[in-house]
Image: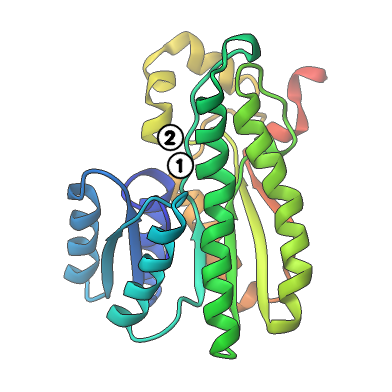
Amino acid sequence: MVTGAATGIGRATASRLAAEGAAVVVNYIGDSGPAESLVNDIEGAGGRAVAIAADVSNEEQVTAMFGQAREELGGPVDLLVNNAGIEKPFPLVDMPLDEWNKVLSVNLTGAFLCAREAARGMIAARAPGAIVNVSSVHEVIPWPSFGHYCASKGGMKLWAQSVAKELAPHGIRVVNVAPGAILTPINQALVDDPEKAREVQEEIPWGRLGKPEEIAATIAWVAGSEADYVVGTTLFVDGGMTLYPKFV
């Protein structure tokens, strides 16, 4: 199951996992068109996929989504990619409480609700599996006017580490993958502004923004058997952004 899979990193990840043989739940919210087109692409290539609408911050919808996934694909989810996330800038003094709550509800509570359902299914089936959280470099890098987003990703770091210790005895690995600046729809305004794009590239030693497919490849590796010893940590996929190049 990949949450927020209709566009960007989620879409690339669902495509990559399907190409590697996984039956994929394409979670989405809102317009069903992009999710359905992805399912059609996957099935056209010989894979299996189903699109399921659910707000990951809504407990009842998450429970229903996992139930539908089990019915349609014939078993419990054994790989969860917590990708759904939102962001919107607000300085501290201007931030409405509902905006703070909205970001925390989707980015952190949503990951918790989905992970809880996935873990329950795996444990009941006595089946090993993995939970991969799409975090961010803002687990560790401050970001003015995005305090709510940073709180959600910083919280995800310690939450994931705690859950990793809980679930390891059940054969369930929990790992965070933390992208840097990636060429996704959420960053389109950045790409369209040459000056802003230049400023961001100066923060990246590798000299460019990343591609969704590069994050998807990392997630696919983390989910596979070659990464069996990778537990409770964060893999930064950021072109070196977390090296703070401007400090040099």
Q: Position of residue 160 (x, y in %)?
A: 70, 57
Residue occupying the far right of the picture? 248
Work out whether residue 184 or residue 90 is closer to the camera in this orientation and state it. 90
Work out whether residue 207 or residue 160 is closer to the camera in this orientation and state it. 160
Residue at x 45% of width, y 81% of height: 76
- Which quarter of the picture shows residue 141? top right
Q: Quadrant of the C terminus?
A: top right
Q: Which residue is mark 2?
A: 183
Work out whether residue 32 or residue 225 is closer to the camera in this orientation and state it. 32
The disc labelled 2 sits on which kind of residue? Leu
Where 91 sits versus 69, above or below? above
At mark 2, the secondary structure is loop
Q: Quadrant of the N terminus?
A: bottom left
Residue occupying the far bottom of the picture? 126
Work out whether residue 115 or residue 182 is closer to the camera in this orientation and state it. 115
Q: Given contact means CB atoms under 8 Å apart, are the residues at marks 2 and 1 in contact? A: yes
- Inspect this view and state whether residue 240 appears: no
Residue at x 57% of width, y 16% of height: 95
Q: Earlier in the sequence, mark 2 or mark 1?
A: 2
Q: Position of residue 118 (x, y in %)?
A: 53, 71
The disc labelled 1 sits on which kind of residue? Lys
Q: Which residue is mark 1?
A: 211
Q: Position of residue 59 (x, y in %)?
A: 46, 57
At mark 1, the secondary structure is loop
